[in-house]
Image: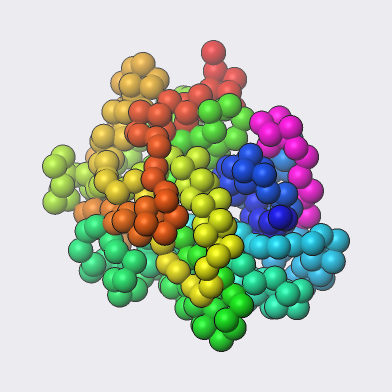
Amino acid sequence: MKVLVTGGIGYIGSHTCVELIEAGYDVVVLDNLSNSHPAIIDAIEKITSKRIPLYVGDVRDSDVLDKVFTENEIDSVIHFAALKCVPESVRMPVEYYDCNVGGTISIIKAMKKYGVTKFVFSSSATVYGADNPVPFKEDFPLSATSPYGMTKVAMERILTDTANADENWSVALLRYFNPIGAHKSGLIGDNPQGIPNNLFPYIARVAAGIYPELSVFGNDYNTPDGTGVRDYIHVVDLARGHVAALDYLETHKGAEAINLGAGHGYSVLEVLHAFEKAVGHKLPFKFMPRRAGDIDEMCAHTEKAEKLLSYKTKYGIDEMCEDGWRYTKKFYGIE
């Protein structure tokens, strides 16, 4: 079966392509290169010994989509392509709604045109907002504290309505928690353009000597050490979840929301200390005031993924940090 992966050479997308290929799927990638590089295709080939076709373009471009669907017998779609920075979304809400919601509507229209009805969606734990108790369950009410989060809520609604309107559609709404780490080969990992907005790649750059120290935003949260707690999941585990979701959609119709997380959390300082263990020495940090919108703790309830997808994570925080540091060293040429 042939899978179209939009945003397929980004951080999560590239790891998912590897897992799909290793599971026997044929993969086609559409990516606009806004936060990725075509050399990732070479890295995926080195890992899998398979060369996957790359179409460079935007999912909102109907001509590009026509080209992809007419030149390939697409069986299903995994949709990663989106803008993803929470603070940026506050400054640029229209651009986020246009790209994320508009892009999703565009790909749905193309799928309808070409008779493709299986869709795996890259959603987010941000859809649970700030008022739900931990751990987050899939049947909790949805809300969001940023335009980015609201685009995920809106896209989930659109896809659910699409599946409700057409009984042939099968949709998995995968709500990610906090993916970190890298492929064990060290050939692909998280290397965002510009200053990272997420904790893990920032720690990696401090360890590599790119930045002088880590800023820890808030040390007065209601957590054991006062720093925010998040459910971190190895990016390879997250990618495995997409393969499991595609397998599930082969025999199930309708739309299903499913958490992908480890089911337990680590604080900012715990992640920092685990990375220090991987590096072999202490890393400088300083405490800073809290950021607006951050909450004490986010953690996934994982029973549904275990039941529906027969899915559990394999890797712990030490492996996440070891693999992330291996990729960082290779990327920056550190011995």
Q: Nearer the viewer, residue 185 or 139?
A: 139
In the rendered view, tell whether residue 109 sits above or below residue 126: below
In the rendered view, tell whether residue 263 sits above or below residue 105: above
In the rendered view, tell whether residue 108 sits above or below residue 126: below
Q: Nearer the viewer, residue 267 or 47?
A: 47
Residue at 23% in and 67% down? 132
Residue 154 drawn at (x, y percent): 48, 76
Residue at 34% in and 73% down? 142
Q: Is residue 55 magenta?
A: yes
Specify whether 207 is left or right of 68: left
Q: Is residue 220 magenta?
A: no
Q: Quadrant of the N terminus?
A: bottom right
Q: Is residue 20 something that shows in the picture?
A: yes
Residue 114 drawn at (x, y percent): 76, 74
Residue at 54% in and 18% down? 334
Residue 201 drawn at (x, y percent): 46, 38
Q: Nearer the viewer, residue 188 or 304?
A: 304
How many numbered circles are shown? 0
The residue stretch that appears in magenta? 43-56
Residue at 56% in and 86% down? 165
Q: Quadrant of the C terminus?
A: top right
